Amino acid sequence: DAKTTQPTSMDCAEGRAANLPCNHSTISGNEYVYWYRQIHSQGPQYIIHGLKNNETNEMASLIITEDRKSSTLILPHATLRDTAVYYCIVRVASRRDDKIIFGKGTRLHILP
Amino acid sequence: SAVISQKPSRDICQRGTSLTIQCQVDSQVTMMFWYRQQPGQSLTLIATANQGSEATYESGFVIDKFPISRPNLTFSTLTVSNMSPEDSSIYLCSVGGGSGNQPQHFGDGTRLSIL
């Protein structure tokens, strides 16, 4: 079973910041938080990941709480092309084992 | 990130036949993975395919149904054998990872419909 809990769906107005929450209360110390998104008819696209610290890249920001039990993905200026299913994943990997368990994700609708 | 190409991108097949899906990467990667995404569902890992070793299958998936080859560090195939309508899904390969700090990257998948 997935180790994360996300809302089933969310709406956000175009041009506003989209804040997608994720609960991972059973996360282990060596597990990273990853975010992917899947736009219709495409494979999952990597967005961002983090271990303890907040992270930012050209696509998004990731805010991880101090206890690491939850996180928020922030799309600073949402566009219609950001409409997708967003998956929050906790993941530990080694050279021999690297399983990603996908939950149901959050279906984000960007409204014009 | 690696560029991943899957062939075919889609196919419609007859019940009882088999189809081999190819995954080609533009760089050498140690770990490759095959996933299935059933209609309206999330992704489920089928198996991990490392070059030089037998594929490791997840619970509910068996080699006779989903044989996998991994002949080199840039290529893998997944065969869906003796297909039935329940096998209608998107099949995706991913590459990379092997470290918690390195993401996996996905191809765009093969959309398979069984009549």
Image (spheres, rainbow, N blue to C red):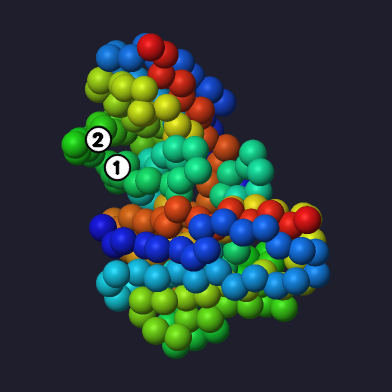
Q: Are marks 1 and 2 in contact (CB under 8 Å)?
A: yes
Say if B100 sits above or below B83 in the image.
above
Q: How many marks?
A: 2
The quarter in which the C terminus of chain A is drawn is top left
Q: Residue at x 72, y 78 (%)?
A: B64
Q: Position of residue B55 (x, y in %)?
A: 55, 78
Q: Position of residue B49 (x, y in %)?
A: 49, 75
Say if A15 sits above or below B71 in the image.
above
**Can residue A90 be seen in the rendering of this structure?**
no
Q: Which label belongs to residue A59?
A: 2
Determine crowd level at label 2: few under 14, some 14-19, many 20+ residues with C-alpha closer than 10 A: few
Residue receiving disc 1: A48
Question: In terms of image quadrants, where is residue B107?
Answer: bottom left
Left or right, B54 with reference to B19: left
For mark 1, name the chain: A
Say if B101 sits above or below B19 in the image.
above
| Front position among marks 1 and 2 | 2
Secondary structure type for disc 2: loop
**How far apart are labels 1 and 2 at the CA level?**
8 Å
Q: Residue at x 35, y 69 (%)?
A: B25
* Pick the front one: A2 or A57: A57
Q: Position of residue A40 (x, y in %)?
A: 49, 38
| Amino acid type assigned to the residue bearing label 1 in the image | Ile
Left or right, A103 with reference to B40: left
Q: Residue at x 64, y 39 (%)?
A: B40
